[in-house]
Amino acid sequence: MQQLMTKESLDKFLNEEFPQVSKNFKILDVNDQSFSMLMYITEEHLRPGATVSGPTMFLLADVTFYLATLSIIGPKSLTVTTNCSINFLRKPNEKNLTSKARILKLGKTLSVGDVLIYSEDIDEPVAHASLTYSIPQK
Amino acid sequence: MQQLMTKESLDKFLNEEFPQVSKNFKILDVNDQSFSMLMYITEEHLRPGATVSGPTMFLLADVTFYLATLSIIGPKSLTVTTNCSINFLRKPNEKNLTSKARILKLGKTLSVGDVLIYSEDIDEPVAHASLTYSIPQK
Amino acid sequence: MQQLMTKESLDKFLNEEFPQVSKNFKILDVNDQSFSMLMYITEEHLRPGATVSGPTMFLLADVTFYLATLSIIGPKSLTVTTNCSINFLRKPNEKNLTSKARILKLGKTLSVGDVLIYSEDIDEPVAHASLTYSIPQK
Amino acid sequence: MQQLMTKESLDKFLNEEFPQVSKNFKILDVNDQSFSMLMYITEEHLRPGATVSGPTMFLLADVTFYLATLSIIGPKSLTVTTNCSINFLRKPNEKNLTSKARILKLGKTLSVGDVLIYSEDIDEPVAHASLTYSIPQK
C-alpha cells in the first residue's frame, strides 16, 4: 500500500492531536510492509505482580493501528475505533512495550487489521489485538 | 449467585491494590443481580471532538468486570483478563461514565460476561464489552 | 424500536432467500423488545461428546441477529456480517437450541448487538455472541 | 514448535472423529511454521449474491485452528473452542476456500492464535479469525 504520511509527519500529528499521551509513544518504523511503535512504561502503567496493565496494552494496540491507518489514508483525526478484540497471551515485564501492526483491509469506510504487542526481554508476543476503524466520509 | 464481598470490602480492595487508578472509580451498586460503577472523567481521558477516549472505556469495562467477578469469588487479585472484545457504539460526552456488568458464566477457572458503558446525558449505551477472566488456581 | 417486518413476513423472507437452511429454523417471537428463534438440531450438527458443534451455534447467532436487524430495517438481503465475537460458555445437550437477540445500536450503516444461545434443559446460556452487521446504502 | 501429529495422522483423525464434515476438507500443509487447509465449497455453503456464507468461513477457521493445535499437542478430541472473534473482510467467490493458521500461544490449558481465510482467485484474505481453544486436563 502507498503511504501518504511519513514517520516525521506522523510524529507531528501525534504531538498536536494527542498531547495527553504523545510523550509515552515513539514511532519506530513506517514503511509499506510494516508499522511499529514503542511505548515507554512508567509507574502509572504497572499492576500488582510486577507487570503492565491490560488497558495499557489496549492503548498501545489502539494508537498503533490508528497511526498505521493514517500513514496510508492521511491525517483524518476523526477516524474512530469501532471494534477491538484483544487476547492477553503472557505476563509482560515491568519494561517498555513494542508493537507491530498489519493492515488486512483498507476500504473506503473501514480499516481492519491486527497488532502484536511485545514486552522487552520476552521473545513471544504478550498480546494480540484485532481492530476495526471507521473512516469518516467527507 | 452468592456474593463473598460487599461494596465496602470491594472499595477497600480497590484502594489497596490499584492506588494508581482507584481515585477515578466509585462502586455504585453491588448485589446478586447487578454490579455497577461510576468513572470520573478528567482532562487526561478526553480526545479531539469533545469526547472520551476508547482506552478509557476499555479501562472502565475491565475494572468493572474484574470487581464484579471478585464480588462473587472473593479477593483474588491475580485474576487476569484473557480476552476482551469491545464495540464502540456512540460518541460519549465529556462527562462521567457509568457501567453495568453481567456475569454469564462463573466456572472454576474462567469468568465470562459483558459490560455496558453509559455516558451522562445519553440514554443508549456508548460501548459494549465481552470479557473473559482467568481465575488463578491454588 | 419500530418494526418494519412481522413474524410472517420474516418467515417468508427466510424461506425465499435461504432455502438451504430455512427448514432448520423457526422464529419464536418478534416484538419491539425481543427477538427469539429456535433451531432444530439434527445429526449433522452433532459432535463427539454428545454435543452440538460450535459452528452450529455461530450459525444460529448469525441468522438470529440478521433477522432481528431486518425486522427493524426491512428486507435488505445484502446486509452482511462484518464482525462476530462468540464465547462458548457451556456444553449444549444433543437437543434443540433457542436464541434471544438484543440490538444495542441501529445506525444508518451499522447494526450492533448480541445474542444469547440456550440449549433445551439447561437454564444458563451455552453461548454469547456480539455481532456487527453492515447495512447496504442505496 | 515440535509437532506430535503428521499430515497423515491428522487426516485419519479428521475422518474418524468428524465423519459429518471431513469430506469437505483437505489438509494442505503441516510443518512447524505453517498449517494450511482447503475447503471444498458446494451448493449448501452458498448465499445470495454469488458468495460463500459467513458460518462456512467460521467453520473453516474453527477446524483449521483445532487441527493446527492438535498437530502440536496430539489427538485430544475434547479440546474445545472457548472464544472466536472473526472479521469478514471481502466477499468470497463461489469457489473453494483455503486457510492458514498461526499459533501465538500454546500453554498447558489454552491455545491462542489466528487464521486467515482466502477465496480462490482473490489475492487478499476474505476473513480473519482469532481463536482460543481450551485443552482438557487429565
Image: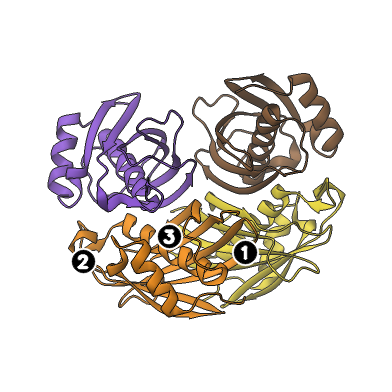
Chain colours: A purple, B orange, C yellow, D brown
Q: Earlier in the sequence, mark 3 or mark 1?
A: 3
Q: Could you tell me residue D95's position as x and y percent?
A: 65, 30
Q: Which quadrant, please, contains the C terminus of chain C?
A: bottom left
Query: From the viewer's perspective, is B15 left or right of D90?
Result: left
Amino acid at pointer 2? Thr
How far is mark 3 from mark 1, CA to CA?
16 Å
B112 relative to A116, above or below: below
Determine which residue is flagged by label 1.
B106
The amino acid on which the numbered mark 1 sits, given as a three-letter code, is Leu
**Is label 2 in a helix, a strand or a loop?**
loop
Residue D21 in view here: yes
The location of residue C134, given as percent across then percent down, is: 48, 53
Side of D117 relative to A136 (left or right): right
CA–CA distance in space, label 2 to label 3: 18 Å
The tag earlier along the polypeptide, 2 or 3, is 2
Badge 2: chain ID? B
Q: Residues within 10 Å of mark 1 (few under 14, many from 20)?
A: some
Which callout, 2 or 1, points at the residue further toward the start of the chain? 2
Local SS, label 3: helix
The foreground one among D122 and B66 is B66
Q: Which mark is residue B62?
A: 3
- Quick one: label 2, few (<14), some, or many (20+) residues within 10 Å? few
Subunit that carries the residue with mark 1: B
How many marks the image carries: the answer is 3
Residue at mark 2 to residue at mark 1: CA–CA distance: 34 Å
On residue B42, which mark appears? 2
| Tag 3 subunit | B
Q: Are marks 2 and 3 in contact (CB under 8 Å)?
A: no
Image quadrant in which you'd find residue C123:
bottom right
| B107 left or right of A22 in image | right
